[in-house]
Amino acid sequence: MGHWQIGFEHPSYLVLLLILPFVWWVGYHSLSGLGSVRKYLAIFFRTAVLLLIIFAIAGVQWIWISDRLTVIFVLDQSDSIPQAKRQAMLQFAIENVKRHRNQSRQDRAGLIVFGREAAIEFPPMDEDLPPIKQVESYRGTTDATDLESALKLAQACFPEDSARRIVIVTDGNETLGNALPVASSLVENGIGIDVVPIRLESNAEILVEKIDVPSSVRQGQPFDTRVVIHRYVEAGEQQQPVDGMLTVRRRVGNQSVTLAEESISLDREVNVISIPDRIDLPAGYTYEAEFVPFDKNNDAISQNNRASSFAYVRGKGRVLMIEDSEKAGEYDSLVDALRRSDIEVEVRDNSQLFTNIVELQAYDSILLAGVPRSSGAGDTTVVSFTDEHIEMMATSANKFGVGIVMIGGPEAFGAGGWANTKLEEAMPVDFQIRNSKIEAVGALAMVMHASEIPDGNYWQKVIARSALDMLGPMDFCGVIQYDALGYKWLWGDSVGMSRVGPNRSQMRSRLMAMQPMDMPDFDPTLNMALNSLVSLPASIKHVILISDGDPSPSSNGVLTGFVNAKIRVSTVAVGAHGPAGHQELLRIANTTGGNYYVANSAKALPKIFQREARRVSKPLVYEPEGGDLPQILSRHEIIQGIDSLPAITGFVLTDVKKSSLVEVPLRMPRPSEPENATLLAAWTYGLGRTAVFTSDAGKRWNTQLLGSPLYDKFFSQLVRWSMRPTADDGKYQIATQVRDGKVQVIVTALDQDDRFLNFLNMSGIAVAPNLQSQPLTMQQVAPGRYVGEFEATASGSYMVSVVPAPGQAPLTVGASVPFSDEYRVREANIELLRNLANLSSREVQPGTLLDPFEPAIIDSLLGHDTYRGGLPRSKSLKDVWPWAVLVGAILFFGDVFVRRVSIDFLWFGRWMMKRFRPDPKAEDEQRLRRLKQLRGQKEAASQTMEKRTASAQFQPDEPSGSEAPSSTELFGADGPTRKVAEKPKSDRPSLQEDADKSYTSRLLEAKRKAKKKPS
């Protein structure tokens, strides 16, 4: 498995070990007074402390050197490799690990698959790869090859405690990224690389290279559509004709025309088929060509058998007008007025919208005629502008100069659910009212019970957020759910309803985190919603209930409360329990006056909720009693020649953007807040112009204007102002070509006298099929010739807009990438694979480039040992210098203790003798001997005391025949003065005191003698 070693992070500090001999010399001489044992012990402690400190300074480490090896197989799953071969590659990896992995040293194996992205099928584990039949983890697209991302993911997956090797199984045809620099970095970091090449299995391939159509065609002008088909045959094979069916279609909107459908024979490597065509109706046309060989063996990849392109046919100024499918024909008067003004109008309803941004480039302006974002009454009839549709319109205005005009109506602007969209961003007014003085407030309560449908909780989050985004900042919103804690509001505490404006972001976060459960009863939730809505200062109050219908039915008393409060409940039935469970939802909607929907598809739910959320926006419709005359605030080319307009009886409240670019030529006198009384506003948005007219076109609010001669003048000037300026195509020519994953844009610039225009400051932008934009840098490469290019990694239609000079109309052109470079016929990139395998470093030997992968030689390939040596062994480091410091500090106290404290270790021996070898007889004899000795000492001391007492005592001689004197004569300075009687003194105290002193002396003397005698 491995072994331990000691290493140092800063080994240069080990030079400090040279001071150890000096420490030994000083200690040997300065500690000689301690005795030999304590001296050498002190020197030992000093040496250990100093050694540990030096090791800590040098960064001492434990180093574990492992013999374990980890191998990660990286398998190419892109479409350039047939599915059958991908499965064989997977089995090769599984069998190779099973044959060569060393279980005794716990080698690891992992598996990563990649296409456009990379994914981990099996992380490195110390067991064989599971015997699966096909890749299960990869969910990314396979229309590209990004080996670079796969290598980076493999590097991140490797554990640190083993040697590492990557085995790459691919054809080497990268369409994204650059793997070689990343591989070089891996090898420098000690990772080995082996490569197994994959070659194209088929000997023949058909590729529809392109369909060549003029990017701009004049109306009625004949031209040829050319389809270029490449027939690939492997080198050395005989060229044989390939028969098949070629189909060419021309499409505009939802209409498609077949230009050719015939059998052809491909008898050369590059085949060009010309098809005559002529377009009489101005529009933007998409061309599609497809070739299908009769013999499938002549074609390995079907994805490259189709190509597309598009062309513009320009005529008069064209406008796309979109109206509500439920009110078709309501704006016919407006259409007639525009056509009388020589403006070509194409009318579509919101059930037949455009499908891509290319279609919009055929129009100079888009007119939204009072259309709401969502409309319809049922699952199958609800139609809606998706976020993609809205972004296409905004991008067309901002990047390509297409104008946008919004005409008002009861279901337009904020009242139509357009708030918080990209379209609102593009218009000169906001669709939400932030003025608290205007009572344009709605309240929406949502009851969520759709947990039992597939992905129910996910869709509840999506639809709730869709409805929330429809509400304005002054509106109220609340969500009721049933979870483990019972019935509760998602926010707002017990009230549940909160204003959207300051809480929108928090509401979105709560919605994404909610986890509703199966609700048992309708009444608690409906009661909560009713009690909260009744107390709110909102003019429109509405409830949306989504359920599968299985909770206990709602009581009549609760529904009567909604009827009395004039609050409608719209219900959405989802199909978990079928029609039987939907009857209760139908009863709730019919009783309260709400709408009833049956949603057979979860994808239809956001549209339904968007439509119902519009109810709370109805207060944005402002209809002053008796109507008002519009006020002209400034002269603008939209109202040029118009001195006054007749009275208008209604419009939609908006909020003027706080920008100096916004112009407001017309305003209504009511309401008193001028920012909300806008009737006409316009501004420039990017390269395009956008305008709003917040009243309608005559059916409801503008009946007086409809019969006036000003009608045609006003609306034609409004629409014509917004239209994209027409470029002088005769002086600027723009073209594109696709090559090596890039789109090249070429512009030729001439002046009025056909002389080259040089040193122009051209700028451009390209918009990908996913509507992501990227800047386009144009550089002059020749007189009057400018070239720029951008990456085109995804297939589809790219739109390019180039502004020749500031103030000039943009040049618009398209480029079609029919399919990813993944589907182009190419041999395996053996050169790249060889370079990857030959990479080496100081520690890593070059890898192995195996023979091309073929099922016939699978046994030979399995003989290659991917777990062989030649790689640097893994070293696991662990810093131990903190422990060295700790042990050194402890040993330092040992050094101090040895030098300052002297210990008699003989007591330990005696204690051990007593503890482990007791002798009672010897102890008794020793005790008797000790007592006898003490007795003798005591007798000697007593005799000595008696002798001293006898010598100290005496008897005075008494005088014969007379008493002792009884008084003493005192003498002063002048002689005797008086006599004082004295008591006879006794000699007892002095004798006793001598006796005490003699006894103490004797005891001390006996003690000294006892110490001198041997025990």
Image (cartoon, rainbow, N blue to C red):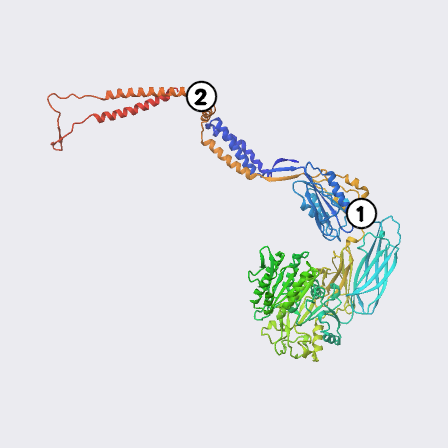
In the rendered image, the vertical position of residue 953 relative to residue 452, given as above or below? above
* 572 or 800, nearer to the observer: 572
Kind of residue sitting beneath label 1: Arg
Image location (x, y in percent) of residue 955? 19, 21
Left or right: 810 in relation to 300: left
Tag 1: Cα neighbours inside 10 Å, few (<14), some, or many (≥20)?
some
Q: Where is residue 132 in the image (x, y as percent from the top left)?
A: 74, 45
The quadrant holding residue 260 is bottom right
**Left or right relative to 480: residue 145:** right
Q: Measure how far apart labels 1 and 2 are at the Cα level.
A: 97 Å
Q: Which dot marks residue 873?
A: none
Amino acid type, label 2: Asp
Q: Mark 2 points at which residue?
A: 919
Q: In which quarter of the image is residue 443?
A: bottom right
Whole-percent x and y of residue 435?
58, 69
Label 2 neighbourhood size at 10 Å, few (<14), some (14-19), many (20+)?
few
Q: Is residue 986 visible?
A: yes
